[in-house]
Image (cartoon, rainbow, N blue to C red):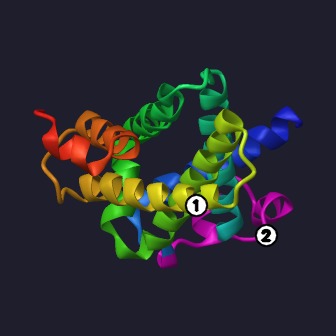
Amino acid sequence: MDKRIEKTKKAIKDSLLELILQYDFNKITVKMITDKANIGRKTFYLHYGSIEDVIKDYKEGVSLELEKSLSKNFSNSENDIHNIFIDLTNLIKSNLSFYKRIAKNDTYYFMRNVFEKMLEETINKIYHKLYHTGSTNVSYYSSFYAAGIMRLYFDFLKGEINITLDEVQDIATRACFLSLDDILNRKH
């Protein structure tokens, strides 16, 4: 991709992310984004059809980053899946105020669905790569894990649970790899 296009798209995404910290989603306009990105409206529409398209592009970028980070660690062990949580935690730490904002503000509820779907797709790909399965049941497990994991992370981000982000990561890992009996019988 042309460097100028990359730079412009990054400016648009960064501007939207900054605006999310200040405004409810339904209050953000293309004009606000273009003013903050210091570009014209025509330039915005040259790259995106709507604000939702910017969100979609952001989601795809985050998803690719997670997948790229995870793909270097495949070795057919549970630690490969554990890397999802390490990478997810690092992603959240990289812009904690943004993720807290979207978790606490109901107008950004759709973002939870975006991240949950992204996590589900990533887990599904990893299961297929690690265990070489074509089973459709894998998608049900991926969906189940993604929903529970996102709930855990979003409860942390909303301040509803009083633990650290690293503890959230540890709970997510244990929940995915241990049976309920193992979790309840372990002394932590």
Q: Quadrant of residue 7?
A: top right
Q: Earlier in the sequence, mark 1 or mark 2?
A: 2
Q: Identify which residue is drawn at 81% across, 65% down.
A: 45
- Left or right, residue 14 beside residue 109: right
- Amino acid type of the residue that numbered disc 2 sits on in the rendered structure: Gly
Identify the residue at image location x=50%, y=79%: 26
Question: Where residue 166 sits: x, y (%)?
Answer: 27, 33
Residue with the mark numbered 2: 49
- Residue 1's x, y, as percent? 88, 37
Circle 1/circle 2 CB separation < 8 Å: no
* 28 in magenta: yes
**Magenta residues, as a range?**
26-50
Viewer-nearest of discs 1 and 2: 1
Residue at image coords 25%, 52%: 156
Q: Residue at x 65, y 34 (%)?
A: 130
Residue 47 placed where, x, y %?
82, 57
Amino acid type shown at disc 1 = Lys
Give the x, y percent position of residue 129: 70, 37
**Quadrant where the C terminus lies?**
top left
Which residue in the protein does label 1 denote?
A: 117
Residue in the foreground of this view, choosing between 62 and 127: 127
8 to the left or right of 159: right
Viewer can see residue 13: yes
In the rendered structure, the answer to whether residue 145 lies left or right of residue 9 reads: left
Work out which residue is located at the far bottom of the displayed protein and give it. 26
